[in-house]
Amino acid sequence: MTELRQRGGGGDGKGVGEDPDSNDNLSDKEVACEDDRLMGMQGDTEGECDVDTKADGSDVPASTADTDNTPQCLNKALEGLPPRWKNYWIRGVLSLAMIFGFFLIIYLGPIALILIVMTVQIKCFQEIITIGYKVYRSYDLPWFRTLSWYFLVCVNYFFYGETLADYFGALVQREEPLQFLSRYHRFISFALYLAGFCMFVLSLVKKHYRLQFYMFAWTHVTLLIVVTQSHLVIQNLFEGMIWFIVPISIVICNDIGAYLFGFFFGRTPLIKLSPKKTWEGFIGGYFSTVIFGFILSSLLSQFQYFVCPVGLSSESGSLFTVECEPSDLFVLQEYKLPALVRNFLLPWETVTLYPFQIHSIFLSSFASLIGPFGGFFASGFKRAFKIKDFASTIPGHGGIMDRFDCQYLMATFTHVYIASFIRGPNPSKVLQQLLMLQPEQQVSIFNTLTAHLKDRGLLPPTA
């Protein structure tokens, strides 16, 4: 950062190149100041570094929320209200609009959901990369934005190709071009990334080395946070739309519940990173989220459309199908209540529930207790660069990343939860892999399986 400030001192570009020898390397004092700031140390250099620290704001972009893009009709309808209540109504109206849009996308089916996830991913990536570009805008770094978007394409090609081969192996085997791409998918992905890596090395420019490596790391961390976790969202979707809808809905519910409880009852600050967050909002959001998730899980568990894994329909010719025999997770079962619960909370001996409702309690608890830390992380990031929001895309809410900072953490937890406690051997995937083998290999496996079943007595000896 010291290098950045020393070289970017002049808006007319004269700060670079006036004295090549002095600009090429940082002085010992500058390096000491920079290291102290990075390590959080305070020592003898503290007074010497104060000037640079105060100048830090000159290279940080102004808040992207300064632009008011609230619809004119909404501004006119709310004029005269105190700013706090005006913001409350703007957030409320736009939240309802987004919820309605979410319901519409669910109605349109899995393809629409995948497209919206990709759109959100690209927008979040663009918002974070734009912040990096604005912070270091005085440097005309060669190929920075081009390489950032190139790496985004490479990573998406890798992840979506893996998903296609994993869930739609039968489709891949029917199409000859897809067979080639599937067989050499990882090599092609590596070759594409390697091309971008070489382009980055060739773009290195004297006097900007450190800054260019900052940006290289910035791009890769953004890819890790945004692209990898959005891929997990789609992986959850293929397990059944309920695994997509419930986690997203409970995070939204927690956000709304914490905001409402904090707005009306909030008195005790929760964390310094987000001064408006209160303990009252945090606790109220927890209970409202658990109740909401429990009820929503009960409603969705009744419909095949939500509980069936998303797969390939070879009979109807449709790419995606959501028809199946529901698993035990979505079949009503009777549970005997513990004595403590019967004595103090509920008067019943037994209750009839969908097993998924019990899992929803754990999902809701994570969304309420740990999920907000994704928002705190984003708040710390924004404070580091002195911005209020990632962008001003949604009036009253900020950017798309401001709305999805907790969703990505929730998606990762859901994926890990499914892999750890839910998913078992999948016969359809095993069958897809068998169909990809050579005919003689398929016959060999058939004979081995037949002999094994005869030995166990599951098939008659003459079968």
Image: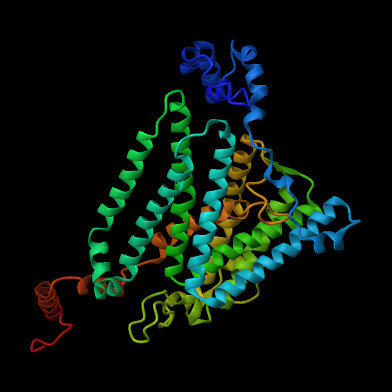
Q: Which quadrant, please, contains the N terminus?
A: top right
Q: Is residue 127 left or right of residue 413?
A: right
Determine which quarter of the picture holds residue 231.
Answer: bottom left
- Front-most of residues 351 and 296: 296
Image quadrant for the C terminus?
Answer: bottom left
Q: Could you say which is closer to the camera, residue 268 or residue 153?
A: 153
* Image label count: 0
Residue 112: x and y in percent read 51, 71
Q: Is residue 130 visible?
A: yes
Judge whether residue 410 can be spotted in this image: no
Residue 338 drawn at (x, y percent)? 56, 68
Residue 219 to residue 75: above or below: above
Residue for point 64% across, 52% down: 399
Relative side of 357 to 182, left or right: right
Q: Residue at x 45, y 45 (%)?
A: 146
Q: Answer above or below: position of 421 versus 63.
A: below
Residue at figure coordinates x 71%, y 67% from the top left: 96
Residue at the right extreme, as displayed: 80
In this image, 435 relative to 320: left or right?
A: left
